[in-house]
Image (cartoon, rainbow, N blue to C red):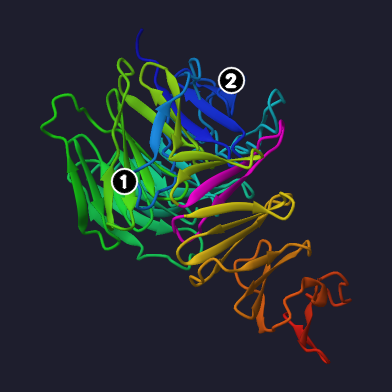
Amino acid sequence: DGAAKICAIAWAPNNVKLAVCTSDRVISLFDDSGEKKDKFSTKPVDPKHRVLLPVRVIRTYANYKSVPGPRIEPRPPAQKSDTLPLDHQVTDKPVKCDFGAGSEWSYAVIHNGSMGEKKVICNKFVQRSAVTCLVWLSEGPIVFGQADGKVRAASHKTNKSQTLYATESYVVALAANSRGTGFLSGHADGTIVRYYVTEDGSAETQGRVATHPVPPFALAWPLGHVLAAGCDKRVVVYGKDGHVSQQFDYSRDDTEKDMGVACCSPSGQAVAVGSFDRVRVFSWSPRKALWEESRPVEIRHLYSITALGWKKDGSRVACGSLCGAVQLFESVLKRSVWKGKFELTYVGPSQVLVKPLAPGSRGVSLKSQYGYEIEDVRIMGQDSFLVARTSETLLLGDLNRNLLSEVTWPHSGNNEKFYFDNPTVCLVFNAGELSLVEYGDNDILGSVRTEFMNPHQISVRLNERRLKSSEDNKKLAYLLDLKTICIGNYV
């Protein structure tokens, strides 16, 4: 009946666990359906100081294309949840960073291999100032902000931390990009800073991006933009250069309150923003080249939303409140069934979950790395391979080995013929041209002109006989004419 704040929520990268952190320093673990499986409590670095302040963590999710934004639908409450994988416990003395999130639930301080196993402290990072927010980048270290304005990075491998940059303003929020290579920091004076921790081919300029009118407690980094919101009841979208691109103003809505948390979808094409009794979802429309708001989700008596977590496959959003409730929502555009064998769940314009209907089977998450809308998905090759299309690319995948490829492919009227006889490479014939796509590689291995389209007259060998030098051995033999065999080397 009173305040029992959900401090943080996070999904495991493999989508099988949900962690929720409550105000009493207890971290609960749930399975992907919301059933509670395990819990453990945390302790201060110094036992003399028992007053701890749990820290909120912001996570990101995926975006959609030219269709309306993902529809978030309520699911049965995950009972009364309470924890998050990334969490710190702070005293008025030196601070200890307690957790981070890894695919095996490896935290900055606590390692949990599977449900019910013993938790082991694996790292401790003592700080001179209180930790206020934290993210664990998939391609980098644990990054946390502090009350003194510093943004620091901690390595769980070396058990050391270092200052990335220092400001004079309290860090109110951190938000990672969808690639896990960089992050944004929001400060009490409104400053928003962009920083990369690893090399990124599409990296934007580092440094101050913009100055928000109020502290950007709700901060997200979707593809190509920065979204910020706070106590002024406005959601502002900034472009790469920091100029205001769009603004959603709710200041005249008496039912709207402060916006305190934001969460980006895994694809970076949608952002959920939590306020009082309400979750708003903003989706990118490529055809209109602007952000659009979906119908907000109204939840009476939920009170202020304090934590959001978007599942890594994009299918669900977990929402925690000031009073200790945790709700699970589905984020689904549409569903379809392929020949009674596979369920196709479109969680975004550029992301589809493909799952066999057979009990106990695990599916794959098909995602366009370029953010293109997936228009067609087919299961082929004795139900072991998939083929999907976008306006500019072709997606191929091996369902048994979970190897997916996306290659640039011009529109050809859908006249291609696909052959899946080779376990490592797909043969694609189109207009007298043969293309080879190796599963798991996003580049076409090679293309040749041939009129002989019988796969039994073509031989492909990829690393079947490894050379002593351990170099790749990739060769193709095909017919130039009835009397000529051509052998190509594609290393």
Q: Is residue 441 above or below residue 7?
A: below
Q: Position of residue 223 (x, y in %)?
A: 38, 55
Callout in the foreground (1, 2) = 2
Label 2 amino acid? Glu
Q: Residue furthest bottom?
A: 483
From this viewpoint, is residue 353 visible?
Answer: yes
Q: Secondary structure at mark 2?
A: loop
Q: Is residue 137 left or right of residue 112?
A: left
Q: Secondary structure at mark 1?
A: strand
Number of numbered tags placed on the structure image = 2
Identify the residue at image location x=70%, y=30%: 114
**Label drawn at residue 8:** none
Q: Residue furthest top?
A: 1
Can residue 355 be found in the magenta stretch? yes
Q: Is residue 364 above or below residue 280?
A: below
- Look at mark 2 in the image and give the residue it sits on: 35
Query: Foreground residue, 302 or 154?
Result: 302
Q: Is residue 72 left or right of residue 252?
A: right
